[in-house]
Amino acid sequence: MKIEVIMNNEMKNKEKKQMLERIIGIHQQILTGNKPNSSQLAELFNVSISTISRDIEFLRTCINAPIEYDPHKRGYFYSAGYSIPINLFTCK
């Protein structure tokens, strides 16, 4: 049982790092103005569309990113100028 807990903690740290890398990558893709969609982002980051959807929701709810979806261009964009607050990444 203890080994499972240790492995789960290690996996969680790895998953957190991967998520952080995706969040920054998604942010950069949206900043390009090309209005990337979930399929493009999933392919770029080699994850499922569901994972990208969770990441987009995280950006919206936890980081307050003003992400909108353009149904005509079928992609995401920022409804207002936005940059990820750097203080989110400070170590304590």
Image (cartoon, helix red, strand yellow):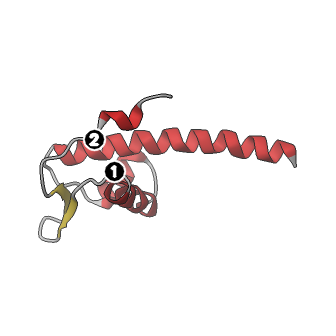
Residue furthest out toward the front? 92
The residue located at (60%, 39%) in the rendering is: 13
**Residue 73 % position (x, y):** 13, 64
Residue drawn at 35 percent across, 46 percent down: 44
On the image, the x and y values in percent for residue 51 come to: 45, 58
Q: Is residue 71 left or right of residue 45?
A: left
* Alpha-carbon span between mark 1 and mark 2: 8 Å
Answer left or right for 60 relative to 2: left
In the rendered image, residue 82, in percent from the top left (x then y), is placed at: 18, 46
Q: Is 28 located above or below residue 64 in the figure?
A: above
On residue 84, the disc is: 2
Q: Residues within 10 Å of mark 2 (few under 14, many from 20)?
A: some
**Percent position of residue 10, x then y:** 67, 39
Q: Secondary structure at mark 1?
A: loop
State the residue at coordinates (27%, 45%): 27
Q: Amino acid at mark 1?
A: Ile
Which residue does the numbered mark 1 point to in the structure image? 63
Height in image: 16 above or below 50? above
For the residue pair 86 and 43, the one nearer the viewer reads as: 86
Q: Specify the farthest residue to the right.
A: 1
Label at residue 75: none
Determine which quarter of the picture holds residue 83: top left
Number of marks in picture: 2
Q: Is the residue marked by circle 1 packed among few (<14), some (14-19), or many (20+) residues within 10 Å?
A: few
Please name the residue shown 46% across and 52% down the image.
47
For the residue labelled by badge 2, is the local secondary structure a helix, a strand or a loop?
loop
CB contact under 8 Å: marks 1 and 2: yes
Q: Amino acid at mark 2?
A: Ile
